Image (tube, rainbow, N blue to C red):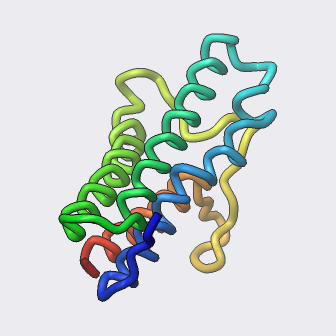
Amino acid sequence: MELAYDSHLLARILLSVATVGYGVVTIKADLNATHATNPLWTPHARFHVVWQVLSYTGVALIALGLIWIAGPLEAERLYLAGGLGAVMYGAFFVAMLSRPIYGGVLYDENGYLPFRPPFGPAGWRWDVNVTVFTAMSAILLLGLAAI
């Protein structure tokens, strides 16, 4: 397998970071007692989170192949990998904004609680997922712009 090294290196690195964000970090973040083995979640909800995480990981492996394995249509493959990431992160923000429709919340009391940000008023609290996914989305956009 020949790896691709060229003028798109910065784009490849940024797209890879964003891809690892949805494809690898979710394994650590969700396959534990806060989500997949959370006794307060229904068994069916736990099934869905495991399915979701494994799906994200599979899509991320495909995206990393598009990013790093040499072949024709190099820029197009990078855009496709970026598009896969945009779907992953975009779906999070759609789910976040549509919470009133289905009664969703950003966190559980026995999960990842909001934290005090490094700046701003003392009463501010940031949600972990919103914070991480916003940063990863920005990295993804920078990666797409670098193509």
Q: Is residue 105 left or right of residue 112?
A: left
Where residue 125 appears, as percent x and y from the top left, is: 62, 60
Q: Is residue 97 left or right of residue 32?
A: left
The image quadrant where one finds the C terminus is bottom left
Q: How many marks?
A: 0
Residue at the image position 44 percent from the left and 72 percent from the top = 3
Q: Which residue is nearer to you in this view: 51 or 64? A: 64
Quarter of image, res 76: bottom left
Query: Does 131 sit above or below residue 50?
Result: below
Q: Which residue is nearer to you in this view: 114 or 69? A: 69
Q: Which residue is nearer to you in this view: 77 or 4? A: 4
Where residue 87 appears, as percent x and y from the top left, is: 32, 46
Q: Which residue is nearer to you in this view: 123 or 34? A: 34
Residue at the image position 40 percent from the left and 64 percent from the top = 69
Where residue 137 appears, as percent x and y from the top left, is: 40, 63
Query: Does 6 sit above or below residue 138?
Result: below
Query: Does 77 sit above or below residue 41?
Result: below
Residue at the image position 54 percent from the left and 43 percent from the top = 57
- The extreme bottom residue here reads 7
Residue at the image position 57 percent from the left and 36 percent from the top = 53
Where residue 116 appears, as percent x and y from the top left, is: 68, 66
Q: Is residue 86 left or right of residue 28?
A: left
